[in-house]
Image (cartoon, grey):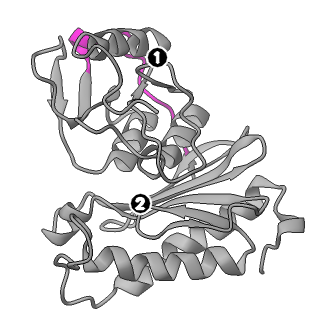
């Protein structure tokens, strides 16, 4: 079933398209022999380009616009726009590390409507719709009850310049999956400590999944995380509980006088 703009109001219909996007990416990469750099721009892999073409074909056929890490903005005038990272964790994928994903978050005039994040190495699928909860492989997920950093396992994008008070940390290399790990209770929190912050395709899918699971999400510097264009970046933070989010944000702010990349 094709989902045109007139039919795109329901989260379940849009979610179906996003699942098809992830499946198309998986199929496009089956049998890929060369997972190396594409030579197009810094950090862009051949898998990124192949996956992007496959994903955009599905998105365009559904009548949606897109903001893709690999190819920029497409038809932003459309009612639904999909913020897309065809291969989040491209370096992991190129090295055979099983922590890389396709992340797709559909936005309408009210904000995030539906999201799918699929670990393409394992097939694990996270999904959420606005007001409809979040799932992993079709089963509802919830975060932990962690409320303080001293007892928490925290994932980083980048790495802080000093110890911030965590119990344990992980640096896994795919922010979308890291956020989903907070949503399902595998991690207690996630914080971006990178020099350049994250782009919306890195975090929007995981953000909605966290929110619908009951986790708390924010930008360390108080900015709106919902970004519909290619350029702006954000310092995303997620935590199992609001109390933990506040502590993690405070710790992150102690590292900097302001956003790494102000708008």
Q: Which residues are magenta?
A: 140-152
What main secondary structure does the magenta stretch of the protein show? loop
Q: Position of residue 29 (x, y in %)?
A: 35, 83
Task: Name the foreground residue: 208 vs 45.
Answer: 45
Residue 124's label in the rendered image is 2
Q: Residues within 10 Å of mark 1 (few under 14, many from 20)?
A: many
**Residue 101, image quadrant:** bottom left
Residue closest to the eye, 139 or 84: 84
Up/down of 214 relative to 252, above or below: below
45 lies left or right of 185: left
* Mark 2 Cα-neighbour bin, 10 Å: few <14, some 14–19, many ≥20: few
Q: Residue at x 27, y 80 (%)?
A: 46
Q: CA distance from mark 1 to mark 2?
A: 24 Å
Q: Quadrant of residue 248?
A: top left
Q: Residue at x 57, y 42 (%)?
A: 227
From the image, tell me which residue sits under label 1: 241
Which percent across, then down, holds residue 213? 56, 34
Picture coordinates of residue 163, whole percent (x, y): 11, 15
Indicate the secondary structure of the residue bearing disc 1: loop
Q: Picture quarter containing residue 240?
A: top left
Task: Tell which circle, 1 or 2, labels the residue nearer the N-terminal end.
Answer: 2
Query: Is residue 24 among what the camera can see?
Result: no
Q: Secondary structure at mark 2?
A: loop
Is 151 within the magenta? yes
User: Quarter of the image containing the N terminus?
Assistant: bottom right
Q: Nearer the viewer, residue 185 or 81?
A: 81
As drawn, the residue found furthest toward the left would be 162
């Amino acid at each position: 079933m094709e989902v045109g703009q007139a039919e795109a109001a329901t989260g379940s219909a849009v979610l179906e398209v996003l699942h098809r996007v992830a499946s198309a990416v998986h199929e496009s990469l089956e049998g890929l022999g060369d997972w190396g750099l594409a030579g197009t721009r810094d950090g862009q892999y051949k898998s990124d380009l192949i996956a992007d073409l496959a994903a955009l074909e599905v998105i365009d056929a559904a009548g949606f616009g897109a903001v893709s890490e690999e190819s920029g903005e497409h038809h932003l005038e459309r009612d639904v726009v999909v913020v897309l990272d065809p291969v989040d964790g491209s370096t992991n994928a190129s090295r055979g590390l099983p922590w890389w994903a396709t992340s797709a978050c559909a936005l309408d005039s009210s904000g995030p409507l539906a999201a799918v994040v699929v670990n393409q190495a394992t097939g694990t699928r996270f999904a959420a719709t606005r007001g409809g909860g979040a799932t992993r492989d079709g089963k509802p997920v919830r975060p932990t009850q962690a409320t303080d950093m001293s007892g928490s396992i925290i994932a980083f994008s980048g790495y802080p310049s000093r110890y911030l008070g965590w119990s344990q940390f992980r640096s896994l290399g795919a922010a979308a999956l890291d956020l989903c790990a907070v949503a399902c209770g595998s991690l207690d929190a996630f914080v971006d400590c990178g020099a350049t912050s994250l782009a919306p395709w890195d975090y929007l899918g995981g953000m909605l999944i966290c929110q619908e699971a009951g986790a708390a999400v924010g930008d360390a510097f108080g900015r709106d995380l919902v970004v519909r264009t290619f350029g702006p970046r954000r310092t995303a933070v997620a935590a199992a509980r609001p109390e933990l989010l506040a502590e993690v944000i405070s710790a992150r702010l102690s590292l900097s006088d302001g956003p790494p990349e102000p708008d």
